[in-house]
Image (cartoon, rainbow, N blue to C red):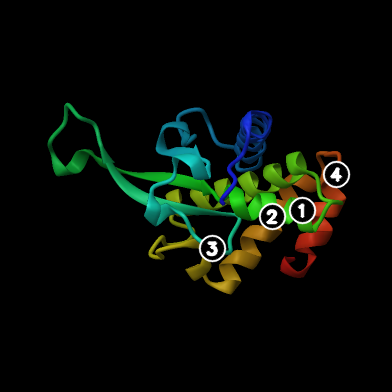
Amino acid sequence: MTRFFNEKELEQVATAALRAEEMVYNYFKLSSSQWLKNRYDIKTARDLLPHERVEGPFAQVLKYEGRHQELSLGSSVFSLYHVCIQDPAVIMLMVEQPRIGLAPFLLYILVHELVHVVRFARFEHRYENACEADVTLEEEKKVHGITHDIIVSQNVAGMPQVFEFYEQWY
């Protein structure tokens, strides 16, 4: 049976999301008008559509086209990104790697995925992949490097173990 995040774990997701947004916002020096707050959504596995659930990655970014309901012109179409956290994969890692804490791991994942969103939105990397697993190895290494750079100076409790887990990606 698949287990989803419980209420306490969902609170940790919400806390990590707020912190990740602030860290990524500051790193990229985005103005409030540049920030993508209304251009992405963070979802956990319970709320994912079947095609948004994947085996393997802890999260993925999917791109959709959005349009304001009151506007019917093609020029009103915008990109909407879904950060899809894969609860079962994260929970399994917590069981397999008890040294890694959920809060710092979620922060790392969300900073990582928001870096992808910013890079896609700024056309620094083209979004043309069906899932995170299809993103090029070079791009993944670049995003992991940026993620590390964003977090390393923040003194996050438990983050050294997360960095150790991902050290092959830097």
* Amino acid at the residue labelled 1: Val
Vertical placement of residue 160 versus 13, above or below: below
Q: Would you name the residue on which mark 1 appears?
A: 95
Residue drawn where x is 38% and y is 48% of the image: 49
Q: Between disc 4 and disc 2, whose residue precedes?
A: 2
Residue drawn where x is 85% and y is 53% of the image: 161
Cβ atoms under marks 1 and 4 closer than 8 Å: no
Q: Position of residue 128 (x, y in %)?
A: 38, 64
Q: Is residue 166 left or right of residue 138?
A: right
Q: Would you name the residue on which mark 4 appears?
A: 158
Q: Secondary structure at mark 1?
A: helix
Picture quarter with the C terminus: bottom right
Q: Position of residue 47 (x, y in %)?
A: 45, 40
Looking at the rendered image, the disc whose residue lies closer to the viewer, 1 or 4, is: 1
Cβ atoms under marks 4 and 2 closer than 8 Å: no
Cβ atoms under marks 1 and 3 closer than 8 Å: no
How crowded pointer 3 is (Cα within 10 Å; few <14, some 14-19, many 20+) is rated as: few
Q: Would you name the residue on which mark 3 appears?
A: 55
Cβ atoms under marks 2 and 3 closer than 8 Å: no
